[in-house]
């Protein structure tokens, strides 16, 4: 592989742990209930609607409005960090003259909110956010735009992400998908490569 396109959340930045802990605090603030880790980890497997159905909270209720208020508040008070070692991996790829891109479901403004992301932003040749394409993931438009604009060989291109949406987008773009499992407990089942640790990214150079 010579062309590496990355998702952002749960792939480059450790957003899941912040999201989970912020929600856990919000739930306790509003409901006075403390949910164990087995329940909270369902957040990465289920949709938001399904998660709240699991814990018997109506997403249209006033309780849900209060939870969302505090969830946003606690998220805004937190710093989402890069995964440990991710900057080193990206620099190693650049030293090997690889192409680096980003395709994310975040908008450009949302991406800029990640202060830690500025540390690695200049390492990427292109960044595609959801607000600059007509059809975001799982549509392959973003991936195909990069491939076509930079004349990349599909058989040398891999998309690295954490979810089924990423897997579907890769398949539709006819490129390989590497599942960043090092922080996630979701149910992504279809992938070409699995990355158990951040340090596994460089191993894709030999694929």
Image (cartoon, helix red, strand yellow):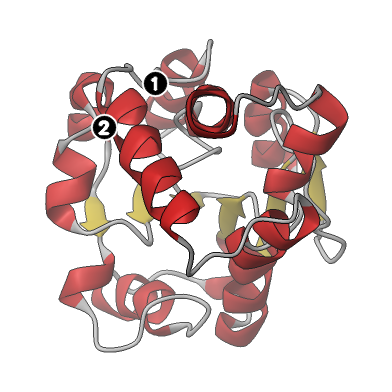
Is residue 6 visible to us here? no
Can you tell which quarter of the image residue 156 is in?
A: bottom right
Q: As rendered, which of 48 and 18 lies closer to the eye?
A: 48
Horizontal placement of 176 versus 125: left or right? right
- Residue 129 location in percent, x, y? 25, 62
Q: Nearer the viewer, residue 37 or 128?
A: 37
For label 2, count other residues whose C-alpha is less than 10 Å away and answer few (under 14), some (14-19) or many (20+): some
Q: Give 20 or 87, whichever is nearer the viewer.
A: 20
Disc 1 crowd rating (10 Å Cα; few below 14, some 14-19, many 20+) is: some
**Is the residue 198 above or below the residue 164 in the image?**
above
Q: Which residue is mark 2?
A: 123
Q: Return the x and y of residue 66 as percentages of the image width and height.
A: 38, 44
Residue 198 appears left or right of 196: left
Above-or-below relation of 36 to 139: above
Residue found at x 50% / y 71% = 153
| Disc 2 from disc 1: Cα separation | 7 Å
Closer to the camera, 170 or 47?
A: 47
Kindly identify the residue that appears in the image at 43 percent across and 27 percent down. Answer: 90
Query: Which mark, by number, is residue 102?
Result: none
- For the image shown, how many numbered marks are present on the structure? 2
């Amino acid at each position: 592989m010579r062309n590496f396109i990355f998702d952002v959340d749960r792939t480059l930045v450790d957003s899941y742990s912040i999201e989970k802990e912020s929600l856990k605090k919000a739930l306790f603030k509003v409901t006075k209930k403390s949910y164990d880790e087995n329940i909270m980890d369902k957040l990465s497997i289920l949709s938001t609607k399904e998660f709240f159905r699991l814990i018997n909270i109506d997403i249209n209720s006033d309780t849900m409005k209060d939870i969302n208020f505090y969830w946003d508040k606690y998220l805004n008070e937190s710093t989402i960090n890069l995964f440990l070692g991710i900057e080193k991996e990206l620099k190693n790829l650049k030293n090997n003259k690889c192409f680096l891109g980003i395709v994310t479901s975040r908008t450009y403004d949302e991406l800029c909110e990640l202060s830690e992301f500025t540390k690695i932003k200049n390492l990427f040749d292109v960044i595609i956010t959801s607000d600059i394409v007509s059809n975001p993931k799982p549509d392959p438009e973003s991936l195909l735009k990069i491939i076509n604009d930079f004349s990349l060989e599909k058989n040398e291109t891999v998309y690295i992400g954490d979810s089924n949406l990423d897997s579907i987008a890769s398949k539709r773009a006819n490129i390989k998908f590497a599942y960043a499992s090092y922080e996630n407990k979701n149910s992504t089942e279809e992938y070409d490569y699995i990355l158990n640790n951040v340090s596994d990214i460089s191993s894709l150079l030999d694929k």
